[in-house]
Amino acid sequence: MSTYMKTNALNTAFQLLKVIASGKLLQEQITEAEAELHIHFDQKQLLTANSALLDLLEKIKAETAHKLKNDTDLLNSYFRKITIAQKDYENVSLFLFLTEHPAEHLDYPDFASYVDFLLNLTEARRCQLFLTMIKRYNHMYLRDTDSDEQTDNVSSEKNISTLDVVAAIMEMDVPMEIRWKIQDIFVHWKSHLEKALPLLNYAYQTLIDFEPQLELYAQNFISYWTNEITNQGGIVPFSEHLFPLNNLPDNPFGYKLYISFFLPFELGFHADLSAENKVLSSPYEIVLGILYGEYVKPQNPYAPDYIEDSEAYINALKLLSDKRRFEIMSYLSEKPAYAGELVKYSGLTAATISHHMSQLAEASLIRLEKIDTKVYYSVNKEMLQKCFGFYQKKLLHP
């Protein structure tokens, strides 16, 4: 029971259901990653070197999809992205599969243990966890939040009621259709679980059946990246190179590596820095897609060095043409600020601020730095200078 796959099969099963519902082949995901993440690699070489692994993953997907052939509509209703007015919204599966893990991992030894956890949640704890999922879905923040700290602690002693949760759902910055869907899941949660848990179990059992083959790839992957992380000076410099993080403290608990099999270029990092005095109580956690390795190195897709095309500069100009975003950038040019400050300054909701900051960060127009429990935003002057240089060259012809 100590193998990587058995320990993390629930996480992988959850991801597998999302990928099946998306209808995308691994080949499509690889092509999209090359374009969207600004990753440059020899696709033919990558496919050839990983052909056995890719065949195995497609076989697992096919077998799981076959088990779910009579539940396709149910699977899609929970796990497929929701498209409204030509805009995609995340699926609602996280409202079904609650977890106390701060990074949403399903860290339970087996399927039965996880079901036992869900069915024995107190109503108060379920409301707390549901509220946390709302915050994450709704651009990470609830409306009318004065500071990050007020909504960042799911273990708060505040007695959250069902009415609090329903009110938070109705205040989400998503279309009403999605709000009603989330509310229905909340109100009839156990009924939805009865329908959704078998889907997760099908995927979980399929992965357990293939555990010996997957475990070999998992151990090779962990060995490779353990050496790579060590060679780059450890988890702190490795993570700070990939993510908009600064001044991460050394972690006495080290780090834990999660492998993303069915989203092969996923990249994520979680650090529990919410404790007082920066006392860490858990290891850092990093997620790496299974196809990162000798032929494809992970890189920060939002780093200025990777954004050199005219489309990126034109997109930056579009973002800055919005009066609210321009005013936010003007405010940040004076000093770094965290989300709560920007809410007070702008009069916008916290969710709207989070949405604007995500767009500005994606365009590399701002930098992010975590200090204590807050994420501070600041203007990325280097990117702005590149933009202005591009505009001058194209429009003024000096």
Image (cartoon, helix red, strand yellow):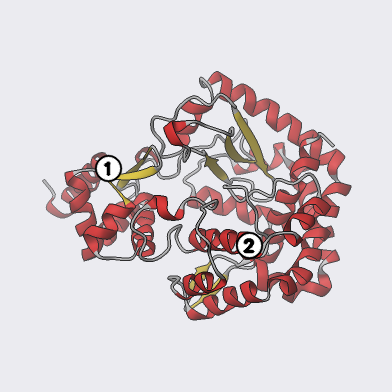
83 relative to 300, above or below: below
Please tell me which of labels 2 and 1 falls first in the chain. Answer: 2
Please state which of the two labelled residues, at mark 2 or mark 1, is closer to the viewer.
2
The answer for how far apart the CA atoms under marks 2 and 1 are is 40 Å
Q: State the residue position of label 2.
A: 126
Neighbour tally class for label 1: few under 14, some 14-19, many 20 plus, Cα within 10 Å: some
Picture residue at 45% right of the left edge, 27% below the top: 249
48 relative position to 82: left or right: right
Residue 188 at what x, y percent from top left?
68, 76
Q: What is the quadrant of the N terminus in the image?
A: top right
Residue 285 at what x, y percent from top left?
58, 37
371 relative to 332, above or below: above
Q: Secondary structure at mark 1?
A: loop
Q: Amino acid type of disc 1?
A: Asn
Residue 17 at what x, y percent from top left?
72, 60
Q: State the residue position of label 1.
A: 380
Q: Secondary structure at mark 2?
A: helix
Neighbour tally class for label 2: few under 14, some 14-19, many 20 plus, Cα within 10 Å: many
Picture residue at 55% right of the left edge, 60% below the top: 133
1 relative position to 114: left or right: right
